Amino acid sequence: MDKKICLYRKMKTQLDELNANMNKLEAKAEEAKDDARALYKGKNGQASPPVRSGKGQT
C-alpha cells in the first residue's frame, strides 16, 4: 500500500477518535453545567447568580 494512503488512513482514524472523545467531553460538560445550575437554583430559588459589585467594592 502506498505510504501516502497509509498515512492518510492513520490520520483519519486519529481524528475520528479525537472527535469521539471531544463529543464525550462536551456531553460531560453539558451535564456538569446542568447539575450546577440545578444545584444553584435549588439553594437560591433563582436561576441566575446574584449581581456582584465591581472589584474592590463592597
Image: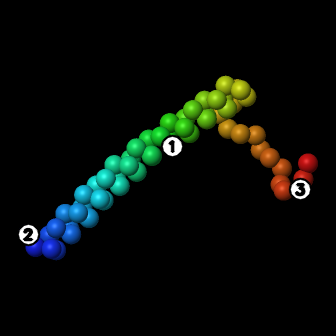
Q: Which residue is mark 2?
A: 1
* Neighbours of disc 1 within 10 Å: few (<14), some (14-19), many (20+): few
Compare marks 2 and 3 and give the one earlier in the sequence: 2
The answer to whether marks 2 and 3 mark residues whose Cβ atoms lie closer than 8 Å is no
Front: mark 1 or 3 = 1
In depth, the one of 35 and 48 nearer the eye is 35
Number of marks? 3
* Mark before the other along the chain sequence, 2 or 1: 2
User: Residue at 38% across / 49% down in the picture?
Assistant: 21
Question: Amino acid type of disc 1?
Answer: Ala
| Rendered image: mark on residue 29 | 1
SS state under label 1: helix
Residue 14 place in picture, x, y as percent: 29, 59
Inspect the image, locate mark 2, and give the three-letter code of the amino acid beneath it: Met
List x then y, in percent, for residue 9. Answer: 19, 63
Foreground: 1 or 24? 1
Residue 24, given in percent of the width and then of the height, sits at: 40, 44
The picture places residue 30, in percent across and down from the top left corner, at: 49, 41
Q: Residue at x 40, y 51 (%)?
A: 22
- Tell me the quarter of the image containing the N terminus: bottom left
